[in-house]
Every structure is written in structure tokens, then in C-alpha cells.
Image: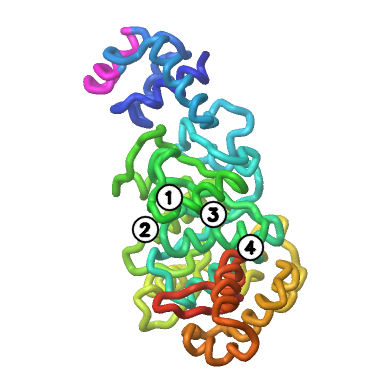
Amino acid sequence: MLRKSLIAVHHLNGVGWSTIRHLFQFGWEGGKIQESILSKLQVKSAQVIRKNWSSSYMDKVLRKLEEKQIDTITIFDDDYPPLLRELPQAPWVLYLLGDRSLLNTKCIAIVGTRKASIYGRKVTEQLSRELSQVNWTVVSGMAAGIDGIAHQSVLAAGGKTIAVLGTGIDEIFPKHHQKLYHQLIRSGLVISEYPPGTPGHPGLFPQRNRIISGLSFGTVVVEAAERSGSLITAEFSMEQGREVFAVPGPIHSQGSKGTLSLIQQGAKCVQSVTDILEELPDWRTEAFTETKQEIAVAIELTSLEQEVWEYLSDEPEHITSLMERITDKMTISDLHSSLLSLEIKGCIAQLPGSHYIKKS
């Protein structure tokens, strides 16, 4: 009864983290909330509960979650993540879609700017892939830019990843991440502290960042401007006594201002995945020597795809230039279909202006 009651009261608009804490402090054990308890709460919170709370309301909330196939985990559950439980304001309830067991794997957060540079994209892809290859679960926020790239790279490598949303679990933000959202549900995990139906709001995203860092042994910031939300995640990580890592970048790049500042403040400078692993538990020392050729073979490219892949490099190449170089090998139609297939397989990326680049 206590677990079900907590989930239901958590849905009440106007009942926040502190109100729930006070309910327990004042002796609530689930079920009916006595007037002797309500009288000790703030007036507005008490009014919301008096007006809405009932056993039928609780049944309605639980039924809707079941209909939407949304799982829940509460702070009273045995499989609640131990690292998250350490937080001063650990979430009372998390809403889940996907593989619940990932919450109790070893996690590392990768976050960064929504305006990722080519450099930031390549570094994120590499670090995400290599961390997933040694069984680290990558946690991020499914935002545009570095967050989305981190999730996509792990999924392409067959690894484990968790997305922490700043909206309700059934609200996709940004909208262009619909495909990624559904991939995460199928092959990873999507979680949210906010009840289903909660729309995006600027004030919610900083709060969710404490969960990204709270689930993780450390946070890696790839690119961040001086006032980036990623720096909030790093700050939470520091406050929680977790490791903070930062990827250096050009001193004139706005996207590197935040990471360079973190390094000045004592964050570990990341030049390779080993710089991260040596600070984390259960790290592995095997050299990361997998070549691009080995990656391509592992993904099983067709002969045409292999041909196109080998023509590309780490530098962006315009499609017209590629056509000129490869038309003696295949038709334009074959080229287009091969490029599309390579992109779907995660071997290449299409950049703005019909430029293509080989993923490292």
C-alpha cells in the first residue's frame, strides 16, 4: 500500500519533493492521509491533497501507468540504484520505459553542448563506444548535440545506455529525437522523475541533471560553453563526491570555454578513454587498438558500401566531390543508397550542406 500510495501522491500537481518528505516525517504510512498530518503541511499543498486524494484516485493513477506500460521504481524498492539513494534529494519515484536492470549497472555520464562541433561529435562517438565496449552504461539526457550523439554511439555499438528526461516519460523532447527515443526504449532505458504528461519547462532540466550525475560514478563533459547546462551536471557530480572529467578543446572555441574552465578547477583532462577508466572502479587496461577497418568488417558492409566507406575520411567531403571520385566504380543511384545504408549502420555521418564524414 505504501508504494502505491507514494506513486499516486507523486502525481499530484502541487505536491513536490519536500511535501512528500514532510508526509513521511509527520507519520504517513500510505493510504489515507490523516487531517492531523495535513494540518502540518503548507496550506497550498494540504489543499491539493484534500481536494484530490482518495483510493479511487490512486487506482486511476496506477491503471493509467499500466495502460501505457510505464514501469515505476520507488525509493522503497530493493532495486533502487544505490548511488542515487545517496543523494540529499533522491527521487521518490522514477518512471521507466525499457530495461529496468540497467539502473543497477556501473554507469558513467557523458554530457555536453547542444551545438556540437565536428570535433565534439567525433570525441563523443569514440568515448561512448569505447566505454560501452568495457561494459560501462552511458547515461545522458537525450538532448540535441552531445547527449544524443552519446546515446546513438552506444546503441550502434550494441552497448547499454540510459536517457534521463527533463519531461514526463511520455513526452519526447526534442521532437526530432523520436527515433532515438524509441530505440532507447527497445535497447536501453528511458527514465524520468516527472509524472507522465509533464511538458518540458526550463526549470525542470537542471533538476534532472542531478539524476544524470547521481546514477553515475563520474561525469564526462565533452563540449560546453561558459554557461552550459552541462556544467550544472558537473557541479552536481562534484557535490555528490563523484569524478568529473573534461575534454580539452581549442582555446578560441566557445564550446570549449566550459570544459577548459573545469580543467582549471581540477577536473581530470581527458585525452583518451584510459584517462577516464583509471579513475573508475573495475577499469580494464586492454589497449583500444580496434581499427576503423575492423569496425567496418564487424558491421558487415556490402562491397559497394565498403567501397564508399574507404573513399571517405576524417575530413568532411561534399557529395559532388565524392561523385567525381567514385562514378567509375558505381552508379549515382548506388552511391546514394550506399551512403544512406552506411549512415544507418553508424559508419558515416551526414553533415550540413551534403557533406559526409567517416565516423572514428
Residue drawn at point x = 39 percent, y = 19 percent: 23
Residue drawn at point x = 40 percent, y = 42 percent: 171
User: Mark 2 or mark 4, which is nearer the start of the sequence?
Assistant: 2
Residue drawn at point x = 72 percent, y = 78 percent: 293
Q: Are marks 2 and 1 in contact (CB under 8 Å)?
A: yes
Q: Is residue 61 above or below residue 111?
A: above
Q: Is residue 72 visible?
A: no
The magenta region covers 35-48
Q: Position of residue 174 (x, y in %)?
A: 38, 53
Q: Nearer the viewer, residue 244 or 241?
A: 244
Q: Indicate the amino acid at tag 2.
A: Gly
Q: Main secondary structure of the magenta part?
A: helix
The residue that label 3 is drawn on is: 242
Which of labels 4 and 2 is toward the front? 2
Dot 4: few (<14), some (14–19), or many (≥20) neighbours within 10 Å?
A: some
Give the spatial CA distance, label 2 vs label 3. Answer: 18 Å
Q: Indicate the amino acid at tag 3.
A: Arg
Q: Nearer the viewer, residue 222 or 151?
A: 151
Give the spatial CA distance, label 4 vs label 2. Answer: 24 Å
Q: Secondary structure at mark 3?
A: loop
Give the spatial CA distance, label 4 vs label 1. Answer: 22 Å
Q: Indicate the amino acid at tag 1.
A: Asn
Q: Are marks 4 and 2 in contact (CB under 8 Å)?
A: no
User: Mark 3 or mark 4, which is nearer the start of the sequence?
Assistant: 3
The residue that label 2 is drawn on is: 229
